[in-house]
Image: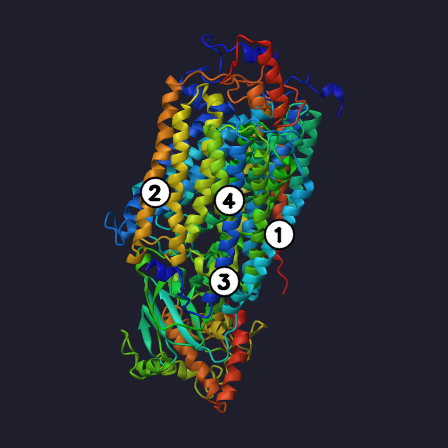
């Protein structure tokens, strides 16, 4: 870091800290501690995933066949790219290049919106295919479509009422569990993406206004850590949900 | 009454083991509590601020002593652990071959008991003295817990899952039955009585169709299951060589190959699942055409059906006592895996 | 300004600039970033919650005097014990010592001007208030009847009460815990005064550090688990409902993964308080500092590995039961090490018996009993019978009331002069401490016997043979109530009428006593202190005091 760019150490120093070094380190430790909490947050869902995948391996396999792997892969690429641009934003924050920061953040935000857009399309497909648990889940309907090709005497299957609650429709709850987990995990992740976008918006506004607190590079580093975390969670979600081996 | 409860109320094979461990733990607890409290009192008096006793060379640490204490307590703890693990593993494990199976269904807020010979009791359980009994428990709704303090025995009754516990009643009498897991408004009234009778009296009670209890029933579980089997039209597909569905004779504890490529052992838990949610348990060579019975059968009826399906296996076997006993123990070992 | 000067010039009449009179508007409190004011706001809020929870407990004990109590219906009784549990655990015990005494003392003890993130600290309080408000509104407007354990599928499908709203409140308050934990960890790591190495830290700070680890790693798990219960209720999903393929045992696993460590959230800070009080009133360096410090960490970490001992009879596999039982026996060891070290500290001490010491001694006695009865429940065979009986109720009240609240009360008395600048009436405090100890044992010891006799917990009506012991317990509860009402009265009284407290009334070591006036100024330290001695150096302090009093013959003891 070139020394002429660094402001006098008293600037941007909160009164509870002795010096900037202490403040910078406190920010970092604080963020990492927060991320450890976040890991446990997702951890409960990962454990649920593990339990039910172990319990219903074939239903999870069947459920994952309704995933759009192409869209999932695109989203993975989008999110990875956004991590790169976020890393660049942090880099330019350290170099105190304001407009480059703004540029990188805008790209990151654009990619994040892209991610959400793809997710929106995927969720929409699930709604259309009656695969949303608690709303319109009809697993047998999907099965029926497949069975029509075969010669099975399907007329014995009890008739299904569309939109009925799972409690009174004849569903395979095992496959429903896959979709519950799918929506819970990707939903919680999407909430994190949205929060990230909101924070990025605030940063962009503050950067454009040249607000003093974003002249200090640590806030941007915090945002960067957060965004990389969101990215890493997806790196785990993608294979677990989209790429289940037989 | 208090005295009666504190001492000499061991009414099951498990209770004396509990008592042993309980009293050893109590002895340990009293020892350590008295030790700590008396040290505190002695130090408090001896080293009170006003006393002029010699306080020379105070010590601030003693690593060796600390590690000795850590080691000593760990050994004591491990000892008690190993000692107390075995009776636990025994009663929740496989029962002896001659154990009588009795089915317990918990529902808000009553206990339904089904004896294999068809006697049904509500909030009451009659047992013969001295014969091992295995309870197979399942809940119709929320989590309950089957608790007989005199037997020192407790087992949670969980929806969707068979649990089991076995013991030998060793004392004649009438003992309280509680629900120990909070289950809603009338949790504290989900109680009943367990009556342990002399084998002779029990036989008489059984012969009278359990007339001492309410809700006595003439038909055995197998017969009731057969009736259900006909009533719900199971027979039209699962009957002899219809080709629509697999035959159920000799199904119990056999290996089933499913269309999804996996195999399963057709134990109680599997059959229950296959009745309630057949679409995920389709055997190779058949279509998923069986209706879902989840909302049509209660847990008691499912148990009846399982009993009937089991009977389809044993009827084809020569019915000698030795044979059936070994058969039972063999199945129980496998059941253990599923009915946790 | 040297320590000696401060002690010799007690400014009795001279009005000091303190955190208390630094702005008197409501806004100066509600928007404060001062950790001390936030601690006071937490103290007031949790005290109100304690009153609510205590009221529910009173109703429960009153109802249980009769085998078929008729003060309330079954539904009301169930709501009452649920409210008692939820309020006392989530809104009183968990924030009690960390958010009040920890918030106030940790920065001062480590020589910092504030916590690392003061605004986050204020946010913690607001989240707590919002969460507590929502839950309390739910419980008072219609109630919730699931018990504090929210076992599925009862909570997710069968209960018709305000489960969702209550959970939302707990969820929000959970973030309060998380943020408090982050603040403590960063502050303790990064903001210690020069010379204050890890092994010179007061043991209270170690305890709060260990507690914060549990806050961080445990709270999110219960948050997401309860959120899933809400989803199950509102959207009819089946995550924990076997009717849809869910596993109710999974809920129990996830729930206890937090809720067992939560017990250590409650007891560890109390242990920290006791580790402060005992050396002070024994005038002696604490015995085995390192062992007490590391046992706190050991408890925090092992605490995450024993949750399954709540599920020995639930249908989890016999082998998991064995592993959890083994680990549960082992986690008793670090607690026993602490008890040993506290007792050994008294050896060759110069012991006086002011109220904080009485509470600390009471803590050791009750915690020892609570811990030992925990072994019964860790033992697989004994737990088969004792699980979910009053034995369990008695055991965890010995830990949470006999342990955590005794420690909290001890700490409140110990630091009251520092927090408010006023002394409480010592005689009344001693009386209250003794009443609390006796009343507590009177209330909860009979419950051990009830549990052994087989009385299940959460029973509204019970068989008549249990009545005698229940009456005893209820009488004890009335005595215990006095043990809490008396301090409430004299604490409030002392705010106006109590004698002004000197800087260091107990002649205790620690930066909060040696370097900071009572009550402290807004930024704690005029100049950051440099620490040159280990904690609890009472031999040094008493030696210095003797030379001081010898020098000033006329003055006598300035701080008695």
Q: Along the line of sight, which residue is nearer the eye, A45 or B190? A: B190
- Which residue appears at 27% of the width and 78% of the height? B211
Residue that protrudes farthest toward the right in the picture: A2
Question: For residue B74, which numbered disc appears in the image?
Answer: 1
Q: CA distance from mark 3 to mark 4?
A: 22 Å
Q: CA distance from mark 1 to mark 2?
A: 35 Å
Q: CA distance from mark 4 to mark 1?
A: 17 Å
Q: Is residue C94 left or right of residue A3?
A: left
- Which residue appears at 36% of the width and 44% of the height? C83
To which residue does mark 3 refer?
B20
Letter of the chain that mark 3 sits on in the rendering = B
Question: For residue A61, which numbered disc appears in the image?
Answer: none
Q: CA distance from mark 3 to mark 1?
A: 21 Å
Question: For residue C476, which numbered disc appears in the image?
Answer: 2
Question: For residue C368, which numbered disc appears in the image?
Answer: 4
Q: Along the line of sight, which residue is nearer the eye, A128 or B233? A: B233
């Amino acid at each position: 870091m070139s020394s002429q760019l660094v402001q006098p150490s008293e600037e941007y120093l909160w009164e509870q800290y002795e010096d900037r070094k202490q403040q910078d380190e406190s920010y970092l430790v604080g963020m990492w501690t927060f991320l450890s909490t976040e890991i446990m947050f997702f951890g409960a869902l990962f454990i649920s995933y593990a339990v039910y995948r172990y319990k219903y391996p074939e239903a999870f396999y069947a459920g994952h066949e309704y995933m759009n792997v192409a869209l999932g892969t695109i989203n993975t690429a989008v999110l990875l790219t956004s991590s790169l641009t976020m890393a660049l934003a942090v880099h330019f924050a350290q170099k105190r290049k304001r407009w480059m920061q703004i540029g990188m953040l805008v790209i990151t935000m654009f990619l994040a919106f892209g991610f959400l857009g793809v997710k929106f399309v995927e969720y929409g497909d699930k709604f259309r295919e009656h695969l949303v648990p608690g709303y319109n889940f009809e697993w047998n309907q999907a099965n029926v479509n497949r069975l029509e090709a075969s010669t099975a005497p399907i007329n014995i299957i009890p008739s299904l009422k569309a939109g009925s609650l799972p409690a009174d429709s004849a569903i395979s709850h095992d496959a429903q569990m896959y979709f519950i987990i799918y929506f819970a995990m990707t939903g919680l992740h999407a909430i994190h993406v949205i929060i990230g976008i909101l924070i990025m918006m605030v940063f962009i506004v503050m950067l454009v206004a040249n607000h003093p607190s974003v002249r200090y590079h640590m806030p941007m580093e915090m945002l960067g850590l957060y965004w990389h975390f969101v990215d890493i969670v997806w790196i785990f979600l993608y294979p677990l949900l989209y790429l289940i081996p037989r | 009454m208090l005295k009666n409860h504190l001492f000499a109320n061991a009414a099951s094979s498990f209770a004396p083991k509990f008592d042993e461990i309980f009293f050893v733990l109590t002895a340990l607890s009293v020892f350590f509590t008295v030790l700590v409290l008396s040290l505190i009192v002695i130090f408090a008096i001896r080293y009170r601020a006003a006393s002029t006793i010699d306080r020379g060379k105070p010590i601030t640490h003693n690593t060796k002593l600390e590690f000795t204490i850590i080691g000593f307590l760990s050994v004591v703890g491990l000892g008690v652990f190993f000692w107390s693990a075995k009776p636990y593993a025994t009663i929740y494990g496989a029962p002896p071959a001659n154990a009588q199976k009795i089915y317990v269904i918990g529902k808000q807020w009553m206990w339904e008991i089904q004896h294999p010979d068809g006697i049904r009791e509500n909030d009451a359980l009659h047992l013969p003295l001295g014969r091992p009994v295995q309870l197979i428990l399942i809940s119709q709704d929320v989590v309950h817990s089957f608790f007989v303090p005199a037997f020192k025995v407790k087992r949670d009754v969980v929806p969707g899952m068979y649990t089991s516990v076995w013991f030998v009643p060793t004392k004649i009498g009438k003992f309280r039955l509680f629900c120990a897991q909070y289950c809603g408004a009338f949790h504290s009234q989900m109680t009943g009585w367990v009556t342990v009778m002399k084998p002779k009296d029990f036989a008489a009670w059984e012969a009278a169709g359990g007339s001492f209890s309410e809700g006595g029933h003439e038909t055995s579980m197998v017969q009731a299951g057969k009736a259900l089997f006909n009533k719900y039209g199971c027979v039209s597909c699962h009957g002899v060589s219809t080709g629509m569905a697999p035959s159920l004779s000799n199904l119990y504890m056999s290996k089933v190959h499913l269309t999804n490529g996996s195999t399963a052992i057709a134990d109680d838990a599997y059959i229950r699942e296959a009745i309630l949610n057949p679409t995920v348990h389709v055997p190779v060579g058949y279509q998923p055409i069986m209706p879902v019975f989840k909302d049509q059968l209660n847990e008691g009826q499912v148990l009846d059906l399982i009993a009937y399906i089991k009977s389809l296996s044993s009827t084809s076997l020569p019915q000698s006592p030795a044979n059936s006993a070994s058969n039972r123990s063999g199945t129980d070992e496998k059941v253990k895996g599923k009915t946790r | 300004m040297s320590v000696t000067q401060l002690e010799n010039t007690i400014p009795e009449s001279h009005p000091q600039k303190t955190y208390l009179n630094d702005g008197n508007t409501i806004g100066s409190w509600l928007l404060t970033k001062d950790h001390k004011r936030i601690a006071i706001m937490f103290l007031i809020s949790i005290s109100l919650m304690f009153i609510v929870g205590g009221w529910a407990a009173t109703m429960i004990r009153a109802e249980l005097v009769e085998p078929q109590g008729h003060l309330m219906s079954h539904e009301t009784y169930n709501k009452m014990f649920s409210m008692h549990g939820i309020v006392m655990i989530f809104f009183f015990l968990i924030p009690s010592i960390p958010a009040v005494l920890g918030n106030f003392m940790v920065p001062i003890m480590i020589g910092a001007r504030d916590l690392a993130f003061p605004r986050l600290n204020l946010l913690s309080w607001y989240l707590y208030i919002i969460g507590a408000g929502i839950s309390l509104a739910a419980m008072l407007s219609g109630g919730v009847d699931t018990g504090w354990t929210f076992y599925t599928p009862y909570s997710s499908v069968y209960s018709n009460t305000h489960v969702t709203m209550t959970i939302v409140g707990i969820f929000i308050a959970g973030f309060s815990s998380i943020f408090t934990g982050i603040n403590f960890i960063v502050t303790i790591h990064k903001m210690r005064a020069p010379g204050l190495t890890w092994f010179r830290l007061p043991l209270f700070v170690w305890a709060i550090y260990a507690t914060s680890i549990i806050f961080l790693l445990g709270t999110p798990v219960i948050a997401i688990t309860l959120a899933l219960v809400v989803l199950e209720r509102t959207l009819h999903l089946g995550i924990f409902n076997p009717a849809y393929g869910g596993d109710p045992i999974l809920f129990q696993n996830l729930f206890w993964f937090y809720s067992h460590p939560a017990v250590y959230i409650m007891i560890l800070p109390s242990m920290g308080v006791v580790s402060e009080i005992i050396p002070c009133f024994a005038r002696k360096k604490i015995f085995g500092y390192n062992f007490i410090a590391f046992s706190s960490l050991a408890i925090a970490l092992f605490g995450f590995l024993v949750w399954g001992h709540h599920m020995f009879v639930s249908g989890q596999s016999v082998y998991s039961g064995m592993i959890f039982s083994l680990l549960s026996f082992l986690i008793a060891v670090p607690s026993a090490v602490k008890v040993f070290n506290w007792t050994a500290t008294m050896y060759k001490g110069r012991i006086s018996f002011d109220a904080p010491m009485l509470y600390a001694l009471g803590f050791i006695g009750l915690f020892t009993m609570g811990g030992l009865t925990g072994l019964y429940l860790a033992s697989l065979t004994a737990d088969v019978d004792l699980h979910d009986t009053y034995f369990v109720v008695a055991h965890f009240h010995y830990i949470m009331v006999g342990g955590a609240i005794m420690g909290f009360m001890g700490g409140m008395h110990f630091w009251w002069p520092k927090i408010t600048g006023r002394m409480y009436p010592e005689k009344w405090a001693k009386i209250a401490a003794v009443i609390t100890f006796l009343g507590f044992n009177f209330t909860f010891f009979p419950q051990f016997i009830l549990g052994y006799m087989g009385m299940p917990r959460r029973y509204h009506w019970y068989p008549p043979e249990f009545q005698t012991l229940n009456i005893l317990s209820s009488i004890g509860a009335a005595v215990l109530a006095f043990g809490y009402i008396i301090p409430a009265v004299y604490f409030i009284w002392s705010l106006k009428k109590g004698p002004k407290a000197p800087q260091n009334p107990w002649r205790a070591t620690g930066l909060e006593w040696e370097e900071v006036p009572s009550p402290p100024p807004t930024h704690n330290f005029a100049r950051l202190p440099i620490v040159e001695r280990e904690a609890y150096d009472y031999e040094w302090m008493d030696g210095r005091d003797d030379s001081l009093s010898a020098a000033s013959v006329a003055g006598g003891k300035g701080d008695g």
